[in-house]
Amino acid sequence: MKNAIKKQISQKVTEVEDTAKSVRREIEKLAS
């Protein structure tokens, strides 16, 4: 059970990091 929760959390973290990367890229595009 704990492993499933851990997996979900790490998946969420990965999603958030991916989103942050995309947002940063968009901001850099607008800034340049």
Image (tube, rainbow, N blue to C red):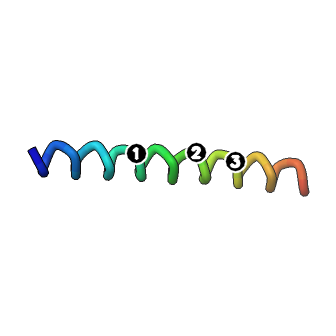
What type is the residue that disc 1 sits on?
Lys
Of residues 18 and 10, the one nearer the viewer is 10
Which tag, 1 or 2, sits closer to the chain's start?
1
User: What residue is at 90 percent from the left and 56 percent from the top?
Assistant: 31
Quadrant in which residue 4 is drawn: top left
Q: Do the residues bearing badges 3 and 1 touch, measured as CB atoms within 8 Å? A: no
The residue under label 3 is 23
Number of other residues with Cα within 10 Å of mark 3, as a class: few under 14, some 14 to 19, many 20 or more: few
Horizontal and vertical percent position of residue 5: 22, 46
Measured in 3D between alpha carbons, the distance from the residue under mark 3 to the one under mark 2, in whole angstroms, is 6 Å
Horizontal and vertical percent position of residue 7: 23, 47
Which tag, 3 or 1, sits closer to the chain's start?
1
User: What residue is at 70 percent from the left and 54 percent from the top?
Assistant: 24
What type is the residue that disc 2 sits on?
Thr
- Label of residue 19 in the image: 2
Measured in 3D between alpha carbons, the distance from the residue under mark 1 to the one under mark 2, in whole angstroms, is 11 Å
The residue under label 1 is 12
